[in-house]
């Protein structure tokens, strides 16, 4: 019940009809580019990429460097470091470091950390922004989870808590009291300006014309 009330208070407007969804499948190709080269250590079976970008459908991860244990995307974990940027539908995530898990040839989860890590999603009439020391993104669920000094705003309302969960698909915000580690959930609601028009000013009364002076000549005195 508390979570539902928080969600209603922090959500601005009804969900958009054209809210983007992720259409990923295990047949969607994964592209990898390493503009600055790569090194493969055969002894440790670790690949190091520099100036790397990995993309699949609407998702992409870019960083100054990345390490991975092989190129098997059926079940592997990649660590990205340095100016990490994750591209999302109509938004993105930025951080110092990211741990990306691949499962069954899909980008399964992206866990990013920073001081803080930041999140942004562009909507039709607003931009949703968030930040936290740790952000977890689950593409299949279209969900972003912000933990440790979490903050989220849609431009009109703000929420801060230990943990905030935001749904990209229906623009719904949840802050479960059981996940707050004793920290209160704070919500700031900005009153919306009224659309009522200011009353029109009364028209000024036009001044009445002054009576004209009698222009007839005065009679001459008789002798």
Image (cartoon, helix red, strand yellow):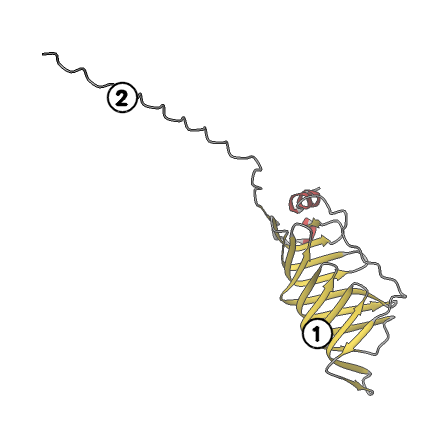
Is 171 or 195 nearer to us in this picture?
Answer: 195
Which residue corresponds to mark 1? 63
Q: How crowded is mark 1: few (under 14 residues within 10 Å), some or many (20 or more)?
A: many
Q: In this view, does 213 lie to the left or right of 99?
A: left
Which residue corresponds to mark 2? 213
Q: Which label is found at residue 53? A: none
**Measured along the vertical axis of the image, is residue 182 above or below residue 205?**
below
Which residue corresponds to the image point at 72% horizontal and 72% vertical from the top-left?
62
Mark positioned earlier in the residue sequence (1 or 2): 1
Which residue corresponds to the image point at 66% horizontal and 46% vertical from the top-left?
12
Q: Is residue 158 left or right of residue 172?
A: left
In the displayed orientation, state which residue is furthest to the left.
223
Which residue corresponds to the image point at 19% horizontal and 17% vertical from the top-left?
218
Is 65 or 200 nearer to us in this picture?
Answer: 200
Instruction: Select label 1 or label 2 by which is in front.
Output: 2
The local secondary structure at tag 2 comes to: loop
Q: In which quarter of the image is the C terminus?
A: top left
Is 10 or 124 nearer to us in this picture?
Answer: 124
Q: Residues within 10 Å of mark 2 (few under 14, many from 20)?
A: few
- Residue 148, position in %: x, y? 64, 60
Quadrant of res 69: bottom right
- Residue 31, position in %: x, y? 82, 72
Q: How far apart are marks 1 and 2 (CA)?
A: 91 Å
In the displayed orientation, state which residue is furthest to the right.
27
In the displayed orientation, state which residue is furthest to the front.
223
| Labels in figure, total | 2
Q: In which quarter of the image is the N terminus?
A: top right
């Amino acid at each position: 019940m508390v979570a539902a009330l928080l969600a209603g208070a922090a959500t601005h407007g009804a969900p958009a009809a054209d809210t983007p969804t992720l259409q990923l499948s295990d047949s969607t190709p994964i592209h990898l580019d390493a503009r600055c080269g790569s090194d493969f250590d055969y002894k440790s079976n670790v690949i190091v990429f520099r100036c790397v970008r990995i993309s699949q459908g609407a998702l992409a991860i870019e960083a100054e460097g990345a390490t991975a244990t092989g190129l098997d995307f059926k079940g592997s974990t990649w660590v990205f470091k340095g100016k990490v940027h994750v591209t999302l539908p109509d938004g993105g995530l930025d951080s110092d470091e990211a741990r990306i898990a691949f499962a069954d040839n899909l980008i399964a989860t992206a866990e990013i950390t920073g001081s803080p890590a930041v999140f942004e999603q562009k909507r039709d009439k607003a931009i949703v922004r968030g930040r936290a020391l740790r952000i977890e993104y689950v593409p299949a669920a279209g969900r972003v989870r912000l933990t440790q000094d979490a903050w989220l705003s849609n431009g009109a309302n703000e929420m801060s808590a230990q943990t905030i969960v935001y749904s990209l698909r229906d623009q719904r915000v949840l802050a479960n009291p059981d996940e707050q580690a004793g920290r209160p959930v704070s919500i700031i609601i900005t009153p919306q300006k009224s659309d009522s028009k200011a009353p029109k000013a009364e028209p000024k009364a036009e001044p009445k014309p002054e009576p004209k002076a009698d222009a007839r000549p005065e009679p001459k005195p008789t002798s």
